[in-house]
Image (cartoon, coloured by chain):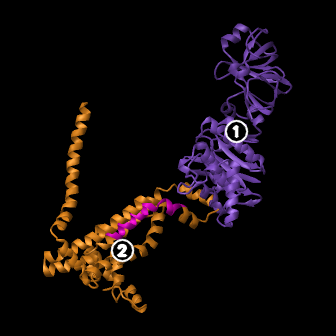
Chain colours: A purple, B orange
Amino acid sequence: MLNVDNISLQVGNFCLKNVSFTVDAGDYFAILGVSGVGKSLLLETIAGLVTPLSGTITLRGRDITKVHIQRRNISIVYQDSDLFPHLSVYENIAYPLRSTKAKQLHETVLRCAETTGIAEKLQRRPATLSGGEYQRATLARSLAADSDIFLLDEPLSSLDAHARSELRSLLRRLNRNGVTVVHVTHDYEEAISLATKIGIMENGGLVQIDTPENIFRHPKSEFVAHFVGTKNFSRGYIKTVPGKELKQFISNGVPMTCLTDLPDGEAYLMVRPDEITVARSKHASSSQNQFKGTITDIAPGRLGVEITVDAGSPFVSTISSESLKSLKLGIGQSVWISFKASSCKLYR
Amino acid sequence: MTSLGKNSTGLQLVFTFLGGVVILFIIAPIAGMYLDTSFALVGEAFHSTEVRESIWLSLWTSMAGTLFFSIFAIPLAYVLARKSFPLKSLVNGIIDIPIVIPHSAAGIAILGILTRESVLGRSAEVMGFKFVGSPFGIMVAMAFVSIPFLINAARDGFASVPERLEKIALTLGASPARAFFTISVPMAWRPILSGFILMWARGMSEFGAVIIIAYNPKTAPVMIYERFTSFGLNYALPAAVLFVTVCLTVFVALRLIKRKN
């Protein structure tokens, strides 16, 4: 659907270097990178706000590299300050609909506002909306524009945790209903929870594009590994255990006990390496998850030593050099790993 | 009270005094003018056809000139606010020239391009009107000296509108013209209106440039000047009070409308 091919440009301190990727209809493509890496510039280039020095952008097979902004049918949503402050929410949503008939226009505004949950605030001015309401109104306007693709530039960054969670649900729902999204963020939790495909951006280039699972399990560069910040990442599904508060997360046939309020279904699990302990034998502890495995790798980490243990699934634990010596650990040795149910971070 | 607080209070008193002198400097002559003129004399001036016609001429020519030249000034202000181009600072400087040159000299300069011998003057004659000695010439003279106020205010107004909003309007399918009229202009309307009021008020009170282009028909400042030079201060004062009252009334009304909105 959207094909970005070898885009390069330089604007001030920001640059893009031979950026290429493809987004299919219905995809939710997250571009993950630290601040100042050129993510926003990439979105603005796709939207036509900035002209690339080289490369091409095609949308639905049409070369739009030099097409005027208003003829691209691409909408862009920023972190904030998107709504026209002198217009009401209703007028903002109706803005792209000027050519339709009054009744049809009204119905479209209502439909878009109801879809995004902003129908109660249509007469309000943008300045009076909360952060979450503001972004709902912005998304409603993009829906009204009937854009081929939504470009989201850190749309959840300025929201509190509750509003962020609600907006994520809304974005997932919009995507399930067929809205194609390219979403840039510096928050890997946000990327995991929303994206079907993630691109990692570094120094103006996309260094890895893959599914969330592969990005986190098989980072292609040190930057990616460092940026995503965790080694224990797996895909599986959550299952309620009757009569118990704790739920089971099963990945690669390994059942783990987790403390989560997510409902049953597919999810991603992350466990920080420093929350996994390694022991020579099984011992009584409060950790709900204890697995026997074999050490497959020992490598110095940024802090301490990283030990990889194959316990049906690979687990990486960070321990100190002193612990490595005192436990006399080595590759091929059998050990027990353990971590608490509350250490399991589940995302959907 | 801390020593800083004491110092601050002392400075505040000095500034208040100095500021008060400035306010007095502006108000005193106008207040004196009102105090020196009886209501009966102002009423008499109001009943003079010459006075009424000259005040009306000043009002409408200045308004018409402001409206007409705003068609050119507002787009120019937008370009200056949004675009970068070679010699932009020179263009910004050129816009302020009418403020710094003597207005009688400005009148002479304008006369040069509006006489019958000039291209503009000849073209006007072909179309059946003339500039020199006519309301059209008065409009041009008024606009020449006052247009910087509109351009500068509108340019600052457009510069304060986030460019991103205009671009968002484009991504929503708006044409550049629609983005300009539905986003840029409404969001910059307060500074534009301020500039509009200033241009109109400044044009209306113009004397130096106008008297050179058109002694007749007489605008209010020319009429007041003529009364003063021909018959003295006492004869000019009531007409001046009446003209100032009209100017202040319209000026205050427009500012109130702006504030209310």
Does the CB distance between marks 1 and 2 fall below 8 Å?
no
Above-or-below relation of A316 to A2: above
Q: Residue at x 61, y 65 (%)?
A: B175
Q: Tell me the chain of label 2.
A: B
Q: Residue at x 27, y 82 (%)?
A: B218
Decide if residue A228 is in sight here. Answer: yes
The residue at which mark 1 appears reads as A191
Above-or-below relation of A103 to A55: below
Read off the magenta span: B183-201
Hey, what amino acid is under mark 2? Ala
Hey, what amino acid is under mark 1? Ala
Q: Is residue A201 magenta?
A: no
A283 sits left or right of B151 in the view: right
Q: Tell me the chain of label 1.
A: A
Magenta: predominant secondary structure element?
helix
Q: Residue at x 43, y 64 (%)?
A: B192
Above-or-below relation of A147 to B127: above
Q: Position of residue A305 (x, y in %)?
A: 68, 18
Q: Residues within 10 Å of mark 2 (few under 14, many from 20)?
A: many
Residue toward you, A164 or A181: A164
On the same chain: label 1 and label 2? no
Quadrant housing the N terminus of chain A: bottom right
The residue at which mark 2 appears reads as B143
Q: Residue at x 70, y 63 (%)?
A: A104
